[in-house]
Image (spheres, rainbow, N blue to C red):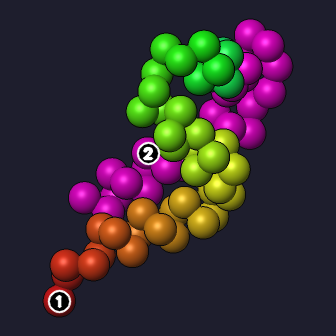
Amino acid sequence: MILHFATGHVLEEQAVLQSGPDLPADISYLHQAIRDGDYPHLAEARDHLTGTGMTELFEQGLRVLTAEVP
């Protein structure tokens, strides 16, 4: 499970490092959808999703995954 988490995180981090209006990492659509109220649950998580560093997110995910491991 940790391998899949790490792999997914790396893929997400690579996408975030991309830039440009035609690339999936362009989050202007996300910001617009949040402003328009199309995704109220996403709006609640906006600051966490767009303001948290990738290292912090990775470490938080590992803590959650390993919290129940003896």
Residue 13 shown in magenta: yes
Corner quadrant of residue 49: top right
Farthest bottom residue in view? 70
Q: Main secondary structure of the magenta part?
A: helix
Say whether residue 37 is left or right of residue 6. right
Corner quadrant of residue 23: top right
Q: Read off the residue under disc 2.
A: 8
Q: Which residue corresponds to the image point at 45% horizontal and 27% vertical from the top-left? A: 40
Q: Which residues are magenta?
A: 1-28
Q: Nearer the viewer, mark 1 or mark 2?
A: 1
Say whether residue 55 is left or right of residue 69. right
Q: Read off the residue under disc 1.
A: 70
Residues 48 and 17: in front is 48
Residues 37 and 54: in front is 37
- Mark 1 or mark 2, which has the lower sequence index? 2
What type is the residue that disc 1 sits on? Pro
Residue 63 in percent (x, y) is at 39, 74
Say whether residue 48 is left or right of residue 4. right
Q: Quadrant of the C terminus?
A: bottom left
Instruction: Tell me the crowding category of disc 1: few under 14, some 14 to 19, or many 20 or more residues within 10 angstroms, Cα based.
Output: few
- Residue 55 bears which disc, if any? none
